[in-house]
Image (cartoon, rainbow, N blue to C red):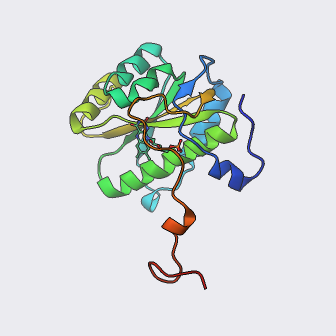
């Protein structure tokens, strides 16, 4: 099991996208804790426009992983939580989906697990995910958050993006855009 962060800020700062997992299953208790975190996430007007599908079936994960190359690693994770949105308010629901996804990643990290976001892709690829998961066409299903015991946070994909982050000086201003710290 990965070392647990010592403080809340360290927990938040050290959340990484995990794409390599051990075959060890995720304990049901841990999954229940993650689902409680998801359930208590705030949403626009408290509409809670979501439903969460816990996917543990290997064949289901394999089928999802084949939707597009950048998410092939999905087949190696022991579990995923697919986020299904009502499909009624695109912008608000997209924001809510981001909040709940990030909370799942943080909570998994806090439990000594790891998580990774996988996007299904284009409208056609989303439709394929919906067929696999039995989701009606009118609902929105854009992504699944994979959960498992991390092997490494290294991105194994040949198409990997550059790691690390921009310097604070590049992304922060004071009082107005471009303003220096007083
Ligand atoms: C909206 C969104 C969609 C993403 N979709 C994918 C994806 O389909 N496949 C994937 O491997 N990573 C996906 N990621 C993960 C990003 O690549 C990852 O957050 C970024 O590379 C930073 O990773 P790091 O925190 O490990 O440095 C997605 C992240 C976000 C926020």
Q: Residue at x 38, y 34 (%)?
A: 159
Q: Residue at x 33, y 57 (%)?
A: 91
Q: Is residue 58 above or below residue 15?
A: above
Q: Quadrant of the N terminus?
A: top right
Q: Quadrant of the C terminus?
A: bottom right
Q: Position of residue 68 (x, y in %)?
A: 31, 28
Residue lying at the far right in this picture: please name it: 6
Q: Position of residue 154 (x, y in %)?
A: 55, 33
Residue lying at the far top in this picture: please name it: 59
- Mark count: 0
The residue closer to the viewer here, 168 or 93, is: 168
Q: Is residue 156 left or right of residue 182?
A: left
Q: Is residue 44 above or below residue 61?
A: below
Using the rendered image of the protein, determine whether residue 48 is visible from the camera's viewpoint.
Answer: no
The residue closer to the viewer here, 77 or 51, is: 77
Q: Residue at x 54, y 21 (%)?
A: 78
Using the rendered image of the protein, determine whether residue 18 is visible from the camera's viewpoint.
Answer: yes
The quadrant where ligand 1 appears is: top left
Q: Is residue 17 above or below residue 20?
A: below
Q: Position of residue 168 (x, y in %)?
A: 56, 65
Q: Residue at x 43, y 48 (%)?
A: 97
Q: Is residue 181 left or right of residue 54?
A: right
**Quarter-of-image position of residue 22:** top right
Q: Is residue 68 left or right of residue 106?
A: left
**Quarter-of-image position of residue 126:** top left
Q: Position of residue 61 (x, y in %)?
A: 43, 20
């Amino acid at each position: 099991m990965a070392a647990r962060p010592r403080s809340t800020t360290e927990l938040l700062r050290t959340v990484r996208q995990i794409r390599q997992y051990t075959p060890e299953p995720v304990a049901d208790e841990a999954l229940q804790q993650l689902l409680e975190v998801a359930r208590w996430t705030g949403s626009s007007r408290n509409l809670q426009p979501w439903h969460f599908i816990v996917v543990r079936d290997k064949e289901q994960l394999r089928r999802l992983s084949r939707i597009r190359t950048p998410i092939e690693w999905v087949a190696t994770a022991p579990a995923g939580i697919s986020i299904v949105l009502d499909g009624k308010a695109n912008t608000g629901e997209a924001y809510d989906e981001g909040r709940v996804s990030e909370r799942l990643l943080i909570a998994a990290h806090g439990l000594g697990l790891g998580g990774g976001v996988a996007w299904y892709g284009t409208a056609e690829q989303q439709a394929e995910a919906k067929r696999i998961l039995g989701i009606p066409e009118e609902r929105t299903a854009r992504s699944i958050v994979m959960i498992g015991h991390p092997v490494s946070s290294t991105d194994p994909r040949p198409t990997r993006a550059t790691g690390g982050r921009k310097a604070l000086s590049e992304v922060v201003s004071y009082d107005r855009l471009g303003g220096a710290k007083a």
